Amino acid sequence: MDEQEKPLSMVLFSGTDDKLSAAAVLAVGAAVMGRPVNIFLQYYALRAFRAGKVHADHALAWEATESLAPVIRAHPGQHWSELLKQAKEVGEVNIQACALSMDMFHLRPADLDPIVDGVEGVAAFMASASDGQVVFI
């Protein structure tokens, strides 16, 4: 398999806006290059993908110090959810919620934003990651 055809698989663990934005930028870049993208939503990232909550303020990571936070917030880039929608429009992007995290937070598929394609377990995610890269954010 050509390197270009190998999937980029991301495990999104953090639900902060800055980390979700970083993941969305990677997804768009890979999708534009023709690489399949698999996104697995766990723990706090999953909570950011709840229906009606995507555009809520999900704070910033602890690394965003008092002096850096205003710089990050003032950046004119697109919201991470819009970037993910663009990635889906230009390429093969699959966003799955972790079944264990869904159980932990007592969520049902109907509780998630429509950008999420479904719910799967770790084994299914690992199978879709195959021999491509896996990034943990």
Image (tube, rainbow, N blue to C red):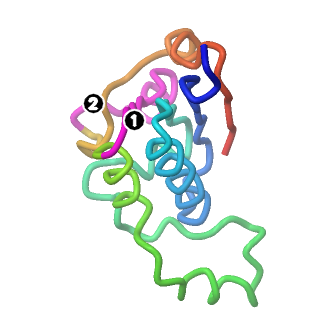
Q: Select label 2 or label 1 by which is in front.
A: 1
Measured Cα–Cα span from mark 2 to mark 1: 18 Å
Q: Amino acid at mark 1?
A: Val
Q: What span is colored magenta in the figure?
A: 90-110
Q: Amino acid at mark 2?
A: Pro
Residue in front for this viewpoint, 59 or 134:
134
Label 2 Cα crowd, 10 Å radius (few <14 / some 14-19 / many 20+): some
Residue in front for this viewpoint, 8 or 21:
8
- Mark 1, residue position: 93
**Coordinates of residue 40 in the picture (x, y in percent):** 51, 31
Quadrant of the rendered image containing residue 106: top left
Residue in front for this viewpoint, 28 or 134:
28
Q: Residue at x 67, y 30 (%)?
A: 134
Horizontally, is 43 left or right of 95 in the view?
right
Q: Is residue 95 magenta?
A: yes
Residue 41 circle label: none
Residue in front for this viewpoint, 53 or 3:
3
Element class at badge 2: helix
**Coordinates of residue 77 in the picture (x, y in percent):** 47, 76
Q: Is residue 104 magenta?
A: yes
Element class at badge 1: strand
Quadrant of the rendered image containing residue 135: top right
**Coordinates of residue 20 in the picture (x, y in percent):** 54, 56
Residue 109 circle label: 2
